[in-house]
Amino acid sequence: MARVPVPEDNQAQVLILSRRRCCICYGLHRDVEIKRGQIAHLDRDNTNYDMDNLTFLCLVHHDEYDGTTSQSKGLRGSEVKQYRQLLYDTITAGVLLAGDKRATVATPSISGDILSVFWERARDAKGNPEPRNSNLFVRLKLVNHEDVPCTVDKYWLTLEIGGHERRCLGYPSKAGKLQYHRPPDNAEVETDVYPLTINYQTPLKLALSREGWVTFHIVECDMPNPSAPFWLMQNIKMAVVDSLGTEHIIGHSSVTVFPATVQLAGIPREPEPLIFDGELQVLHIDTHSVLARLYIVNSSDNQRYVRTVTASVEMGGVRSKLKPVDDFRWEGSRTRNMEHGWSRKGDLRSVNYPEPLRPLFPDLSPVALNPGEPRIGWVHFKVSEESHSGPSINLLEALDPDTLLFSIVDSTGKEYPITKTTETKPDGFISLRHAS
């Protein structure tokens, strides 16, 4: 049968999504070089050009996948789809793909200016003044100098109060109006207040400048002279935290603060929750390793980034952190040529030739999850040198499985413990396989 050409629009989408990287090269070897290649049909039906059925492969892997030896090589459509998703996740997470054999994690580079600062005494929900509590309204300008689009998850303000530094968390202001008296003629000025919102729908891109307002609610803080037309605030420091968890310093200087009257739709008192949920599906402990298959899901209404998963356990009455391992090699193998795999019950081929374990994350974290998007995969831990400095121990004897605690860590460093355990019995078991 003559090969049916893939429509131009579909070809373009595949090439853009993959950045001309072979997903099998990435899935097996984390090779991220740009390759000469072709678009493959995962179901080997060249009349099916649905996007879910297409992927970019280098010439070697394209021939291997389409060739008659593909079954013996174990290159199945479902496996290649997983490798494709790992590659797409890595690109979506804002990871720049370098020209060498390994990828390098790039982070946004954000700078900015504090354009103006206004003060108002804080008010409760009924509009009554709160003694010694203040609101600061800060107008910021931010710009990203790297080609890594990002959101801004946190705004920090550090200022001196009573001779001590106080660090306060801020939130994008509600829309409204602000009135103040402008020196030297004491003219009354009204200006619009609008939120500085940099989320997954409107990320901060390369060379893109964004202005807006951020509100800081400061408890037990009164301004030096609220009746004065303005005053100078020394050594105010501003910082923002992007979606990859990097903190960027925005300003460290003296600023003029003006008393103001502000009418907003409302002042947010609580940050938007960053909610991740999870479930422990399979747990395996041997003499050297702790392996777990986890299910995690983004339960929030926005795209969020997962930085990593941590694990801790009680040993000798002390809770200790376990050290993450970036592969599934079996420590008991002197030559390191064996790794953990998965054998499905009732599948003789899988028992004799265990399947590779799919990692929860690719090597390059963090990973972006859309609202409601789940992720399933394996994590591997061992006892860290910091938590155990003596001779090597048998984990089966040393730890209590009931005290194991896995936690999801988001891009801001906040942890979400995984407290659920699936009640469904696993469809297979951990076994050993020759490392690829």
Image (spheres, rainbow, N blue to C red):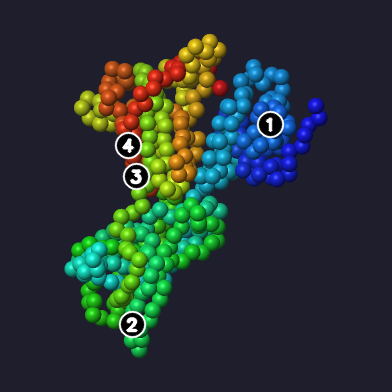
Q: Amino acid at mark 2?
A: His
- How crowded is the residue under tag 4: few (<14 C-alpha within 10 Å), some, or many (20+)? some
Q: Earlier in the sequence, mark 2 or mark 3?
A: 2
Q: Which of 254/371 is in front?
A: 371
**What is the distance, in whole Å, between disc 2 and disc 3 at their CAs?**
41 Å
**What is the distance, in whole Å, between disc 1 and disc 2 at their CAs?**
68 Å
Residue 381, image quadrant: top left
Q: Which residue is depicted at the point 73% across and 41% down? A: 7
Q: Which residue is depicted at the point 40% across and 57% down? A: 240
Q: Which of 430/36 is in front?
A: 430
Q: Earlier in the sequence, mark 3 or mark 1?
A: 1
**What is the distance, in whole Å, between disc 3 and disc 1 at their CAs?**
41 Å
Q: Secondary structure at mark 2?
A: strand
Q: In this rendering, would 195 be left or right of 388?
A: right
Q: Secondary structure at mark 1?
A: strand
Query: Which residue is under mark 2?
Result: 181
Q: Amino acid at mark 1?
A: His
Query: Which residue is under mark 4?
Result: 417
**What is the distance, in whole Å, between disc 4 and disc 2 at their CAs?**
50 Å
Image location of residue 282, percent across then percent down: 39, 23
Query: Which residue is under mark 3?
Result: 414
- How crowded is the residue under tag 2: few (<14 C-alpha within 10 Å), some, or many (20+)? some
Image location of residue 181, percent across then percent down: 33, 82
- How crowded is the residue under tag 1: few (<14 C-alpha within 10 Å), some, or many (20+)? many
Q: Earlier in the sequence, mark 1 or mark 2?
A: 1
Viewer-side label of 3, 1? 1
**What is the distance, in whole Å, between disc 1 and disc 4 at their CAs?**
40 Å
Q: Amino acid at mark 3?
A: Lys
Q: Secondary structure at mark 4?
A: strand
Circles 1 and 2, Cβ within 8 Å, touching? The answer is no
Query: Which residue is under mark 1?
Result: 41
Circles 1 and 4, Cβ within 8 Å, touching? The answer is no
